[in-house]
Image: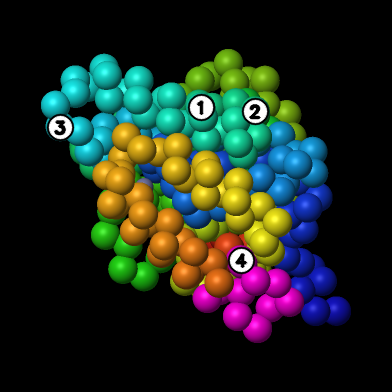
């Protein structure tokens, strides 16, 4: 018997309901729209949960917060149409601002217990040189919420959801924005959709900034596919939920 046979790397393509937890409106798609589009095409239901209101990223400083929020949501809706997102949810914490980590975790627990996903996507909280606190907090709260989903003595932000929750559904976690991938997703066939989705987020990027992002994603997707039997990839750390604790 091997450790791999006890805690195998979960098969992403067995996913039926995927909850993708992101700090900001565009992170799921920048990091993983290629594989997520494939999974949606394969029949998986995609649910996006955004932790913050993302208002600090809006490049046009002249628009009001209400207008900026509308621009972000319409960007997200357009990208979601391309990727095949079934439902969008928002926590609305202040982007790059002060909010409580445990409130965030309680909200993530609520959505996990409510949606009952079999896979979770989230940023890798342990990414070396991640300077954005929203990314670290979102990644860590997502990982904790996965571990604690069945422990209903740890309350979510909705007692009714906790009372109705019955069984564990999570088979795997895919951490994106990772320096230690154990799986390179072949996104050659969905590269065009990924870039079309990323280009929808024009409230957050100047035209020059968007071209720089697309060029960087283009180079990175080919760099991570070096040595693989395909030309473009997205790096992921795919883990059994039990592998999130204790270093096993
Ligand atoms: Zn972000």
Residue topped by disc 1: 77
For label 4, the SS is strand
Residue that carries the numbered disc 4 in the rendered image: 233
Magenta-colored span: 223-233
State the CA–CA distance, disc 1 to disc 3.
22 Å
Q: First in sequence: mark 1 or mark 2?
A: 1
At mark 3, the secondary structure is: loop
Q: Residue at x 61, y 67 (%)?
A: 232
The correct choice, above or below, for 12 with respect to 166 in the image is below
Mark before the other along the chain sequence, 1 or 3: 3
Residue 94 appears at what percent x and percent y? 26, 32
How far is the residue under mark 3 from the one under mark 2? 31 Å
Q: Secondary structure at mark 2?
A: strand
Image point 73% across, 29% down: which residue?
166
Along the line of sight, which residue is nearer the eye, 231 or 8? 231
Tags 3 and 4 touching, CB below 8 Å: no
Between circles 3 and 2, the one closer to the viewer is 3
First in sequence: mark 4 vs mark 1: 1
């Amino acid at each position: 018997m091997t450790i791999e046979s006890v805690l195998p790397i979960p098969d992403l393509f067995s996913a039926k309901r995927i909850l993708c937890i992101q700090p900001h409106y565009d992170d799921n798609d920048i990091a993983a729209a290629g594989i997520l589009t494939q999974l949606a095409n394969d029949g998986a239901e995609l649910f996006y949960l955004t932790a913050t209101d993302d208002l600090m990223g809006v490049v046009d400083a002249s628009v009001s917060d209400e207008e900026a929020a509308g621009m972000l949501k319409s960007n997200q809706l357009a990208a979601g149409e391309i990727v095949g997102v079934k439902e969008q949810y928002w926590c609305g914490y202040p982007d790059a601002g002060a909010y409580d980590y445990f409130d965030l975790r309680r909200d993530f627990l609520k959505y996990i217990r409510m949606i009952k996903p079999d896979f979770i996507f989230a940023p890798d909280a342990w990414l070396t040189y991640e300077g954005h606190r929203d990314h670290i907090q979102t990644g860590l709260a997502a990982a904790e919420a996965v571990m604690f989903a069945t422990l209903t003595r740890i309350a979510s932000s909705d007692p009714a959801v906790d009372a109705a929750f019955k069984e564990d559904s999570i088979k795997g976690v895919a951490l994106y924005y990772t320096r230690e991938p154990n799986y390179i997703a072949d996104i050659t066939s969905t590269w065009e959709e990924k870039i079309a989705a990323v280009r929808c987020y024009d409230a957050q990027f100047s035209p020059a900034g968007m071209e720089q992002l697309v060029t960087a994603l283009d180079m990175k997707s080919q760099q991570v596919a070096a040595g693989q039997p395909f030309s473009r990839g997205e790096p992921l750390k795919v883990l059994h939920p039990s592998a999130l604790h204790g270093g096993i």
